[in-house]
Image: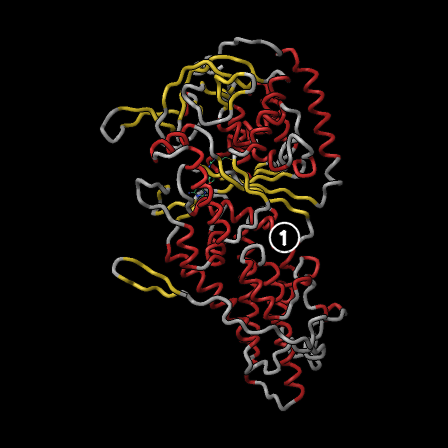
Amino acid sequence: MNPEVAVTLVSKKSMCLLTPLKHQRIALHRLSSSSVSQDEKSYYITTPIFYVNASPHIGHLYSAVIADCLHRYKLLQGFKSKFATGTDEHGLKIQQAAEAAGKDPLVFCTDVSERFKHLFSCCNISHTDFIRTTEQRHREAVEHLWSVLWNNGFIYKGSYEGWYSTPDESFLTASQVGDALDPSGKEIKVSLESGHKVEWMKEENYMFRLSAFRSELLDWLSANPLAVQPERFYQDVLQWLQEDLPDLSVSRQKSRLQWGIPVPGDPEQTIYVWLDALVNYLTVAGYPDEHSQWWNVAHHIIGKDILKFHAIYWPAFLLGAGLPLPQTIHVHSHWTVGGKKMSKSLGNVVDPLERSQMFTTDGMRYFLLRQGVPDSDCDYTDAKVMKLLNAELADSLGGLLNRCTAPALNPAQIYPHFCSQSFPSEQSSGQSRAVAEDYHMLEAVKNLPAVVEQHYDTLHVYKALEAIGACVRQTNGFIQRHKPWKLDRSDCKDQRWLDTIIHVSLECLRVYGTLLQPVVPEISNKLLSRLGVRPGERSWAALMFLPKHQGVNCPFEGRALGSNSGVLFSRLEKNHTGSQHKYKT
Ligand code: MSP
């Protein structure tokens, strides 16, 4: 046991229950894996619930946009998908923030929670549930889980002595703590990971028997190598499990922490905020009532700073309660500004609402997902946003749509006919006008859905967008190569070839528009509507590219294009007004 965390057992009520429970848990595991096929078409995705002690920043929006992208993607694939987000409202730091603001804690929480809701609705975050930990349904779920853990013998009353960081709401071991000076030059102890001040805490409270779960957690990870992604975070979890795994304090004395859920049967103690917060995922799934439809297919999106809570504490609580473990924990890295963590004191917090008004909602979504890499931190600048959006959305994708729908090239404003002689399915001489690069492009676009699918599934959205961008460039190259504007429309062969060039380009655009829906829903809708693709024709299943090359009738051929609702994405321009950079579309 860690010498810094001295635990005195007061109640030894149930240590002997371990063996039968282990069997029960393994049985439950089997049950959950056999029920996978029954739940095959259900999907449950969650974001972390956000602390309400500060306003949202782009890092928060990033977590939400990733989850939203996966949710929309699963819906397009025909899954029934549940998408939960919400706010984490209990705990000492919220209590202190409300006090500092001179507000009643619930009023304070409601204000900030509404700000998150507003941001999400402005950014097209299509959550199906928004949970607040101050809701009654959540309190019931937490109380129930606590009672199950208690009855199963995994919670006991003890005394905790060790380091605690209020800003992180986290207990730390000696090796996680270092020396630092506060602004007045006083020596203090800080968390080595977050840099936040820590305090020595000694009090009687309830302990969770975390140490009992090490081998089961290791078994889970070795049987599920994709449980924590990307790989480097999986390795971090394995590494932590090699270190000391002391029992975890799961309550605080009410005298110190009032703003939380009281321990069932002991109103003098308040449940630890992380145990309270993690249960939100179960609450939304329906727990303690029927919850297996969703809980068996749960996937979490989290930032790297909260990995230990999700990949060690949370699975241990679930194992203790005999519940199945999440399918995947997708971890993402952080956004920095000027190479530094965003913080109010540094004055480098980027407001996501303001930026989505500046760059449009889809612009911001696209930027975050195109530039954000799960494995490593990424630095945010407005200039990067502008450059990327202008190049990829305005010029490349928007330019392609413009070319194919411009009245000069497409006076009839239809999805023109495809001519197999001009562009046979196999490269040949004869009347074919297509060249080798055109066949390479077709091959790339045909394979694109599978490539994108693989990247969406592993949350490498930036790679999916990179692959789509490369295909868009190829299609622009195809048009540039054949210069349809130079063809002689009075010659019927030239006219057929022109129609074919436009048909193929529109087919490419239809694939790009369909695949981009999870990332930029508004732009995709505009694009697909302009092509005349109906809402029922936008799913993954409807993605057959260039059916005419597969001997299948093309339902779009000859169909009128949708109305022109303006450019797909207007170029952003930089306006220097004093020292402020403003962007306008
Ligand atoms: N309330 C806890 C989570 C409880 S989940 C049961 C919490 N809240 S938070 O508001 O601090 O963070 C919410 C999410 O935002 C976390 O996934 C965190 O990693 C993410 N981000 C916070 N800052 C970030 C960046 N600068 N960049 C990217 N994501 C960031 O932790």
Q: Is mark 1 within 8 Å of ligand 1?
A: no
Q: Nearer the viewer, residue 361 or 461?
A: 361
Left or right side of 35 for 360: left
Query: Hey, which quadrant is residue 23 in on the image?
Result: top right
Q: Is residue 313 visible?
A: yes
Q: How many marks?
A: 1
Q: Residue at x 40, y 27 (%)?
A: 166
Which percent across, then down, holds residue 350? Answer: 38, 48
Q: Nearer the viewer, residue 264 or 302?
A: 264
Residue sticking out furthest to the bottom: 490
Q: Amino acid at mark 1?
A: Glu
Which percent across, then down, holds residue 216? Answer: 63, 24
Q: Which residue is mark 1?
A: 453
What quarter of the picture does the C terminus occupy? Answer: bottom left
Q: Residue at x 60, y 55 (%)?
A: 452
Q: Residue at x 72, y 41 (%)?
A: 39
Query: Hey, which quadrant is residue 160 in on the image?
Result: top left
Mark 1 Cα shell of 10 Å, populated few (<14), some (14-19), many (≥20): some
Which percent across, then down, holds residue 174? Answer: 40, 20
Element carrying mark 1:
helix
Q: Nearer the viewer, residue 116 or 362?
A: 116
Looking at the image, is 172 positioned above or below residue 447? above
